[in-house]
């Protein structure tokens, strides 16, 4: 099943307000802010829809995050393991990919299971 949240919609409450004004400004003025605001909403995720059934199968990970993860991996020249570690633990990557859900399901990728299917 296809899962992609709309990154063009704004939040009623700022999910990043806990960072404080200095850290938030630093993120907004860095490549992370540019990626989140300009690149992430324009990723061609909808072109993947035809590969997923609307009713059957397990829901995908949030596809903007997954496509963004692959771009960031190439941008920073990281191995799969390094990219997954950044995705799981790096607040800058969470901000970049607009991962606002604090649950593990939003910011965790199990690399071993992913590679088993390759």
Image: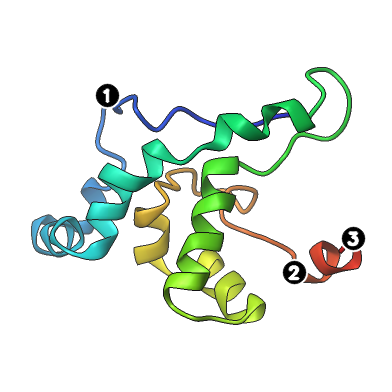
Residue 113 lies, in percent from the top left, at 85, 64
- Between 65 and 25, the residue placed more toward the observer is 65
Give the label, 3 or 2, closer to the camera.
3
- Is the residue 45 above or below the residue 108 in the image? above
Q: Select label 2 or label 1 by which is in front.
A: 2
Q: Secondary structure at mark 1?
A: loop
Disc 1 designates what residue? 12
- Residue, x 72% and y 39% (percent of image)? 60
Q: Please indicate, yes or no, whether residue 42 appears anywhere in the rendered image.
A: yes
Q: Position of residue 95 (x, y in %)?
A: 35, 55
**Of residues 104 and 36, the one drawn nearer to the viewer in this rendering:** 36
Q: Residue at x 30, y 28 (%)?
A: 11
Q: Is residue 107 left or right of residue 100?
A: right
The nearer-to-camera label among 1 and 3 is 3
Determine whether 2 is above or below 117 in the image: above
Query: Mark on residue 111?
Result: 2
Residue sitting at the far top: 55
Which structural element holds mark 2? helix
Task: Determine the residue positioned at 78% across, 29% down.
Answer: 52
- Viewport quadrant of the N terminus: top right
**Label 2 neighbour load within 10 Å: few <14, some 14-19, many 20+:** few
Q: Are marks 1 and 3 in contact (CB under 8 Å)?
A: no
Q: Secondary structure at mark 3?
A: loop
Characterize the local packing of mark 1: few (<14), some (14-19) or many (20 or more) Cα atoms within 10 angstroms.
Answer: few
**Residue at point 28%, 60% (across, down):** 32
User: Which mark identifies residue 117?
Assistant: 3
Between residue 71 and residue 86, name the one nearer to us: 71
The quadrant of the picture occupied by the C terminus is bottom right
């Amino acid at each position: 099943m296809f899962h992609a949240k709309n990154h063009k919609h704004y939040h009623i409450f700022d999910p990043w307000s806990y960072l404080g004004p200095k850290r938030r400004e630093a993120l907004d003025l860095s490549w992370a802010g540019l990626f989140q605001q300009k690149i992430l909403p324009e990723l061609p995720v909808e072109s993947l829809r035809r590969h997923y059934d609307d009713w059957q199968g397990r829901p995908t990970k949030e596809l903007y995050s997954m496509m963004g993860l692959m771009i960031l991996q190439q941008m920073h020249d990281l191995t799969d393991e390094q990219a997954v570690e950044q995705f799981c633990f790096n607040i800058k990557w969470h901000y970049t990919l607009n991962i606002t859900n604090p649950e593990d399901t939003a910011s965790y990728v199990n690399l071993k299971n992913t590679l088993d299917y390759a």
